[in-house]
Amino acid sequence: MVRRIVNARVTDVTTADDLVQETLVRVLAAAGRVEPGMLEPYAIVTARNVVASLWREQDRHRRNRHRIVDLEVAECPDDDLVAQEEKSAVAEALGRLSERERDTLLAHEVSGQDTRSLAIELGSTAGAVAAQLNRTRARMRVEYLLALERIEPPTDRCRPVLFAVSSGDRRRQREVDAGRHLLECDVCARLSQPLVERGHSRDDVVRIPMRSDTDIVAARQAARELASRLEFRPTDLTLIATAVSEISRNIVRFAGSGEVVIELLDEPRRGVRVVARDTGPGIPDVEMALKDGFSTYNGLGLGLPGARRLMDEFAVASEVGRGTTVTMTKWRDQR
Ligand SMILES: [Zn+2]
């Protein structure tokens, strides 16, 4: 289907191939946030946009060909203007939130107040505040785009659809029949793309590249922050943070670099999952490495066996010369 759409618009075979690939990459990247029934309309919209952006690019080059200067440099004088427009779009979008939404968002994002202390002030729970923040961010992204492009949506179904797309809430997408609306409404079709792609930032996943000791600290803090939204007991938060810093330290010490992904789970029950990957030398004997007392740390830290004890589930996959992946989970209501 994607190939058909692209081929109908682009004659050059190699270019068409590239565009099909580009479309599929974008669609697959967004698949987790899109209701299954919406994947087809989303693919159609994406294919059209990818072709259109190629045309815009070619057009820009054609128009600028006579300038024997670097295009990027030539654009610099506009930067101030762009920044100014973005600033006023943010201000306008903020103005469209309710006062409570705005205050909470600013307290969290700008002043750095955490969800727990916000919950105390609002007489709510950290989990409820986090969920509300997610909804507010989703609305903010929509209002920002509308303000930036100076668009008033053509129908009163548009905003609910855009909010559902922006939040990645698949149940809500189904309820408002977002897939059908995207096929019928050009405005929403165009806006939904940046909304889904911007959404690489699912708010319940954090990905931290591991290179140095400061990354270990960042991973530790991120794990604690995410887990606190599920209202783990303070002692559990400490266990999770400690396990994360142990496996992060493993990466920095032995592999040099890798990444740690921390994710909140709803299924089969609430919990936090941590996946630590590296492309380091690998562990020749995983069973041995998991035994207490076995330490390549020379006595420092808890190592893998320590991290395993702190979590509810723990798995190591390792291949010598290829790297190691540690997956560990702590459940909210284990006991
Ligand atoms: Zn619409």
Image: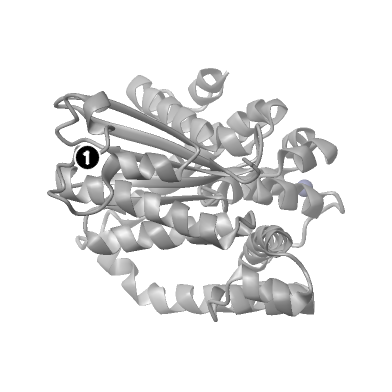
Query: Which residue type does callout 1 highlight?
Result: Gly
- Viewer-side residue, 21 vs 280: 280
Question: What x and y, as percent, mark residue 153?
Answer: 78, 56
Residue at x 38% of width, y 55% of height: 242
Q: Please, what secondary structure does the residue beneath circle 1 have?
A: loop
Rendered view: 278 above or below 143? above
Q: Is residue 275 visible?
A: no
Horizontally, residue 26 falls left or right of residue 169, namely left
Residue at x 64% of width, y 28% of height: 39
Q: Is residue 205 visible?
A: yes
Question: What x and y, as percent, mark residue 271?
Answer: 59, 43
Picture quadrant of residue 233: bottom right
Residue at x 47% of width, y 72% of height: 82
Residue at x 30% of width, y 58% of height: 216
Question: What x and y, as percent, mark residue 178?
Answer: 77, 39
Picture quadrant of residue 255: top left
- Viewer-side residue, 308 vs 258: 308
Horizontally, residue 102 falls left or right of residue 26, namely right
- Viewer-side residue, 175 vs 126: 126
Horizontally, residue 11 falls left or right of residue 41, namely left
Residue at the farthest front position: 293
Q: Residues within 10 Å of mark 1 (few under 14, many from 20)?
A: few
For disc 1, the marked residue is 293
Rendered view: 320 above or below 330? above
Picture quadrant of residue 286: top left
Question: What x and y, as percent, mark residue 68?
Answer: 19, 60
Q: Quadrant of the image for the C terminus?
A: top right
